[in-house]
């Protein structure tokens, strides 16, 4: 089972690299450039989780904080590297400690005071994700200015000229 999992993952990553290649040269440098989070950050986060769930017998609950942080940071960095979306993905770094603390809360002694920083960090992260995602989307729409301007003119004219039906 492990051989199938490893070979399947490697083939999947190789396929993604070839898909993103788009006529550029292909080599080990390209793999490291795109997949450094999957090679270095994510395995370290998984290692911390493995230590907690597999080795410590549920006693080292503090291992989940860096484990959760590293997994979220690894996912954020991997998505940002693959899609060149650092300008949208950076709020994930605010979400990372919230996930680590949430794991600590969930598997630990459930100290209710941990929910305060978890909620603050999560709300801030989601707020920034929404603002920067909509900002990026709006900038892309505005780059097609003639079409967007025409659409606004037609919409405004329709609102001004259409009358309300009176019965």
Image: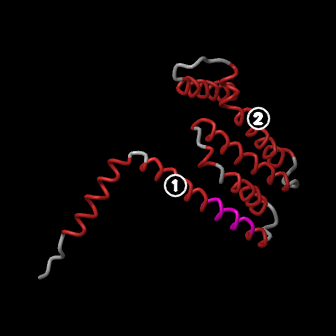
- Quadrant into which the N terminus falls: top right
Residue at screen point 65% across, 59% down:
125
Give the mark, 2 or 1, whose residue is nearer the N terminus. Answer: 2
Place of residue 128 in the rendered image (x, y in percent of width and height, measured from the top left): 61, 59
Q: Measured along the vertical axis of the image, is residue 128 above or below residue 140? A: below
Q: CA distance from mark 2 to mark 1?
A: 31 Å
Tag 2 residue: 40
For residue 146, the mark is: none
Quick one: 120 or 85, which is closer to the camera?
Answer: 85
Identity of the residue furthest to the bottom in this view:
167
The structure residue drawn at horizontal position 77% and vertical position 72%, both measured from the top left corner, is 112
Among the 4 quarters of the image, the one containing residue 42: top right
Q: Quadrant of residue 83?
A: top right
Type of secondary structure dominating the magenta stretch? helix
Q: Is residue 144 magenta?
A: no
* Image: magenta residue range: 117-126
Q: Which mark is residue 135?
A: 1
In the rendered image, the vertical position of residue 2 relative to residue 95, given as above or below: above
Quick one: SS at disc 2?
Answer: helix
For the residue pair 78 and 52, the one nearer the viewer reads as 78
Q: Is residue 61 above or below residue 49?
A: below
Q: Look at the image and tell me in which quarter the C terminus lies.
A: bottom left
Q: Position of residue 160 (x, y in %)?
A: 23, 69
In the picture, measured across the screen, residue 160 lies left or right of residue 109, that is left
Question: In x, y percent, where is residue 11?
Answer: 60, 24
- Tell me the SS state at disc 1: helix
Q: In the image as oriented, which residue stretches furthest toward the left?
A: 167
């Amino acid at each position: 089972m492990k051989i199938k999992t490893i070979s399947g993952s490697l083939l999947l990553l190789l396929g993604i690299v070839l898909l993103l290649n788009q006529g550029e040269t292909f080599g080990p440098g390209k793999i490291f450039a795109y997949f450094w989070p999957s090679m270095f950050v994510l395995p370290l986060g998984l290692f911390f989780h493995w230590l907690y769930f597999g080795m410590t017998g549920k006693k080292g609950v503090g291992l989940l904080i860096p484990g959760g942080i590293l997994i979220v940071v690894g996912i954020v960095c991997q998505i940002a590297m693959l899609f060149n979306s650092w300008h949208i993905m950076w709020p994930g770094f605010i979400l990372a400690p919230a996930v680590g603390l949430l794991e600590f809360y969930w598997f630990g002694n459930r100290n209710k005071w941990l929910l305060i920083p978890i909620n603050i960090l999560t709300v801030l992260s989601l707020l920034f994700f929404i603002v920067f995602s909509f900002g990026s989307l709006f900038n892309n729409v505005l780059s097609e200015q003639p079409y967007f301007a025409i659409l606004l003119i037609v919409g405004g004219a329709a609102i001004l000229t259409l009358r309300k039906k009176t019965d």
